Amino acid sequence: MRTALTAAAAALALGLLTGCGGGAGKHDCASVASAVNGDVKDLRTAVSRGTGNPRDAATALRRLQLNLDQLTSGGNNAKTSKAVADLSLAASNAKNALDKGEPVDLGPITNAAGGLTSSCGKG
């Protein structure tokens, strides 16, 4: 199972590696923002199932960080860079809560993901 998840994450990351920079950065940023929104949705699903599923939540957080890593080297505008930093911090805080067995606050993650989507949609 772990190998399959690792392979899937690697395939996703490889597909995104060619984007996020150069002249087509706006389109690539939007693609990554869309993937991040999918990761946030997966995280929300994982933590909202009754007592939550820590393994699924951890997987969603890893995918989210992999996607964010694609934007850190892409020569983004200041708004996108701030949104990536905010979302990365929110994901780190969520991971810390998850590691401690505490409830995960999705508010900061959702807000930061919205900021990323907004900044990627603008040139």
Image: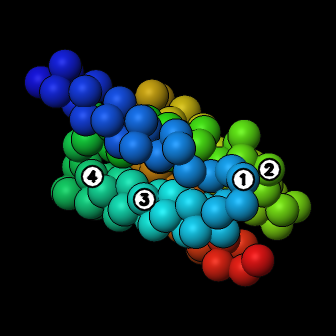
Specify the quadrant of the image occupied by residue 93: top right
Q: Nearer the viewer, mark 1 or mark 4?
A: 1
Residue 14 seen by the camera = yes
Percent x, y of residue 59? 33, 37
Percent x, y of residue 99? 45, 28
Residue 102 seen by the camera = no
Image point 28% across, 25% down: which residue?
6
| Residue that numbered label 1 is attached to | 22
Q: Nearer the viewer, mark 4 or mark 2?
A: 2
> Mark 2 vs mark 1: which is more N-terminal?
1
Image point 62% across, 52% down: which residue?
20
Amino acid under disc 1: Gly
> Mark 3 vs mark 1: which is more N-terminal?
1
> Mark 4 vs mark 2: which is more N-terminal?
4
Amino acid under disc 3: Ala
Helix, strand or loop status at disc 3: helix
Q: Is residue 85 above or below residue 106?
A: above
Disc 1/disc 4 C-alpha distance (Å): 35 Å
Q: Quadrant of the N terminus?
A: top left
Disc 4/disc 3 C-alpha distance (Å): 17 Å
Image point 64% across, 78% down: which residue?
121
Amino acid under disc 4: Ala
> Mark 1 vs mark 4: which is more N-terminal?
1
